[in-house]
Each structure stands twice: as structure tokens, then as C-alpha cells.
Amino acid sequence: MKYSIIIFLIVLLQLVYTSEALVHTKRTFNHTQWGDQTFYWEYLPPGYGNGTKFPVLLFFHGMGEAPFNTVNFTTLDRVPLNAGTPPYYISNNIWPLDLPFIVLSPQAPYGHGGGSVELAIRIVKEQYTTHADFYRIYVTGLSQGGGAVWQFISSSTTNGLNAAAVVPICGSVAPTAGSNQFATVVSSNIPIWTFHATNDATVNISQTTTAWVNGINALGHTPVPKYTIFATGGHSIWANAYETNRAVNTQNYIYDWLLSYSRAPGGSTTTTSVTTTGPATTATTASTTSTTGPASTTGTTTTGTTTTTTGGSTTGGSCPVGGGTPQVINYSGNCSCSCTCN
């Protein structure tokens, strides 16, 4: 009898675990932009199909996940192998249920560019018409995928208006000298939170992320970009940015920040204070503010090893970064050696 009870409990635990397993599904989208098909991973949040419009998170991988050949359901398996990314968390059943995003992670045969993002937004608008909130489409990517995000928002105002907020991480694309890319980004008032490490030996921080931030800040971009710089971590700092454990990632929890932004009809940006706690379909919200003109650019917040400031540019020196691994300096514009960088 005792043995039977033990077996019953084991089976019951297995059933409970299975019922809570996250579903990560391979999908295809037929088109003529890159041949005839795009393969991507799909995650649908709890409550999907109940009549609620859900926000969308588009994730773009780096060069390491590109097959450099024909993309198919087999090569698609490379995308969630990169630890510390949204598709990795979902495939390993550690993506929090309180995050209400539809998550789509497309694969590109030779790496992503701005056209990859345009195509993914087309997929959202054609394949998820009933259940996706088109005013809350968020775009993020790492390395080459991060570069694709910069290319996307700098190639046309319409592109920027099609996204509610973006998070490019150690993006590999530098702005083109003499182009109107900075003005294009500024024209859409797209909220940006970008990440890089000072010791990134793969993608030069000053030629890419810092150049983008300084260029758009010089034109008065609103809202002022958030710029998080890690003193260490090299090229692989995306796990710090994508970390889903709020208790661990107290300084850089991008998910609430993303959800705080949405586009209103006509393209203006709406900000809402969001905390993702409880059921995925009932995130608490408060203090809603519509932003149609320049955002506020005052204030400084210092917490532990992180300094967040607003306004200005990132030129004028660099703050000391000794001690702590990694030590984080959050730039939302005006941070030089005159800042308090603990």
C-alpha cells in the first residue's frame, strides 16, 4: 500500500509539471521577401484566446544562431540554445507566467537586419490580428540582432512608429556618417533602452551603441534613451539584460519598462507604470501619462552600484568602474565623471 501511494505521488507530480510546462511552437510564414518562408518560434501567454489583446515581444538572435544556409525546422533549434535569452527561458520552462507577452523569435539564414524586424511586424499584423495588441509591439535583439533593431528604427519614421519601445543589446551596427539616421530615430519618439559592456572585444562600444546614443541625444530625442553600460561581461552581457528573476535583476528589469510604453492611434507615445505581478492577464497599472511632445529630462536616481540620470549626452569622460563584477552604470543621457557612479 505504501509503495502504491509513492508511485501515485510520483505520477501526480509528473502530471503537475507537465501541465505547467511552457509551450514553445515552431511556425512558418510564407512570403517572397527572403525566398518563400520565414521560420520562427512562437510563445503564447496564459489566457491567450480569451478575447484579450496581448503585447508582443519580438526577439532577434545574433550571428551565432544563424545557420548560414537554408532555414528549416531543424536549424530553428539553434535559436533557443543561446542561454540567457527569451527563447532560451521559454524552451527551458523558466519564463515567468506573469509576463503577458506573445513572444516571436524568427531565424534568419545569414543574420538579421532591419528588414527582419519589418517582416516580423508584418507577421504579427497578418497572423495575430485577433489577439495581438498592435500598439504594444516591442523589439529587442542581441549583437547582430541588436544591430537590426538600430537599423529598423533609423531607416524610416514609420518603422519607429510601428514599435512601442525597443531594447538593442550590444548591437553590432554603427551609424552611417553623414546620414539622416539620427533624425529618423528622433522623428518617431521611440523609447530606447540599450545595453553594452565597455570591455566588449567583439563589437566596439564607442563606434556603435555610444555613437547611436550621442547622435540622437544631440538632436533632443524624447524620451531620453536609457543606456546601461556594464564594466565587465564582454560581448555576452545579454543575460544580465534579459534576466527574468526580478529579485536578481533589480536594476535592469526591462519587461516592466517595456510594458510601460504603448503607441496611441496617430503614433504618440503613452507611458504607464506597470508591475507584472500575479496572473499574466492582470498586470497592475497606475499613473498613466500620455506623451506627445518632449518628455521630462530632469532627475537623478542612485541605487547601489547603479546611477541613472536623465538629460544631456554621454560625452565628457567616463565614470570610474573599479570593483564589483559586474558594476553597472545606467546612462539616460547625462553621465560623465561629474556623476556619482558608485
Image (cartoon, helix red, strand yellow):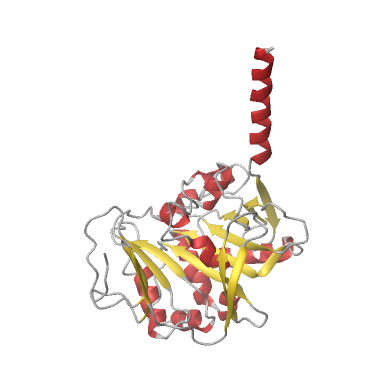
Can I make out residue 208 in this image?
Answer: no
Question: x and y percent of residue 286 in the render?
Answer: 59, 71
Q: Residue at x 28, y 77 (%)?
A: 315
Q: Is residue 12 among the parts visible in the rendering?
A: yes
Q: Is residue 183 left or right of residue 177?
A: right
Q: Residue furthest front?
A: 2
Vertical position of residue 318 compared to residue 234: above or below: below
* Rendered view: 314 above or below 107: below
* Quarter placement of the N terminus: top right
Residue 261: give x, y in percent of width and height.
57, 72
Q: How many marks?
A: 0
User: Where is the C terminus found, in terms of image quarters?
Assistant: bottom left
Q: Could you tell me residue 229's position as x and y percent?
A: 34, 64
Looking at the picture, does residue 46 appear above or below residue 337?
A: above
Closer to us: 206 or 326: 326
Is residue 171 found left or right of 206 in the rendered image? right
Residue 175: percent from left, percent from top: 40, 74
Q: Quadrant of residue 307?
A: bottom left
Instruction: Tell whether 334 sits left or right of 318.
Output: right
Residue drawn at x 50%, y 74% is 191
Question: Which sits in the foreground, 130 or 45?
Answer: 45
